[in-house]
Image (cartoon, helix red, strand yellow):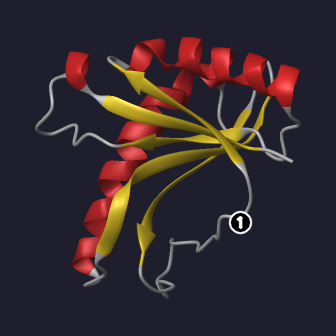
Amino acid sequence: VIHPSDVGMTIGRGSTELRAELVAAGVEVDGPAYARYHSWEKDSVDIEVGFEVAAPVDRDGVQNSTLTAGREAVAIHHGAYASIPKTFGALEAWVAEHAEAREVGREVYLSDPDTVPMAERVTEIVIPIV
């Protein structure tokens, strides 16, 4: 659990460290980095940073999780990570009007931050819905 002001730093550092840990363990990463929010309050955010892998990872410091199957509302964000909250907010508003959220949601970072300029990055915003 972190403070909301630390979300960007936590995702960046967490995904870099986790990718290095997985590669060192010989684990093949099957997809882009993601940030999954378990809760988001005024002063605290419970966040999970991860990658899709083919099989569970048995390594200290690594927790395995599974996404639940079902319907999802999805928006595609183009541009800097700093403006993701605006896209996330628009998707949350759509969900509030048309469906019911099952979870807070997640961001899937479709662009490689090491090779794609910030202004050209693409992020998928996903909210699981009923």
* Observer able to see residue 43: no
* Observer able to see residue 38: yes
Q: Is residue 74 above or below residue 90?
A: below
Q: Position of residue 28 (x, y in %)?
A: 28, 78
Q: In this view, does 20 lie above or below 58?
A: above
Q: Is residue 30 above or below residue 18?
A: below
Give the side of residue 105 with respect to residue 100, left or right: left
Residue labelled with disc 1: 69
Give the side of residue 130 with respect to residue 3, left or right: right
Q: In which quarter of the image is residue 79?
A: top left
Give the side of residue 86 with respect to residue 73, left or right: left
Q: In which quarter of the image is residue 113?
A: top left
* Quadrant of the frame with the N terminus: top right
Q: Which of 121 and 24 is in front in this view?
A: 121
Instruction: Point out the residue furthest to the left here.
Output: 115
Q: In this view, does 79 lie above or below 67?
A: above
Using a 10 Å C-alpha cutoff, classify the residue at mark 1 as few (fewer than 14 neighbours), some (14 to 19) or many (20 or more): few
Q: In which quarter of the image is residue 85?
A: top right
Q: Which residue is drawn at 65% across and 64% down?
A: 67
Q: Position of residue 97 (x, y in %)?
A: 86, 20
Q: Residue at x 47, y 37 (%)?
A: 124
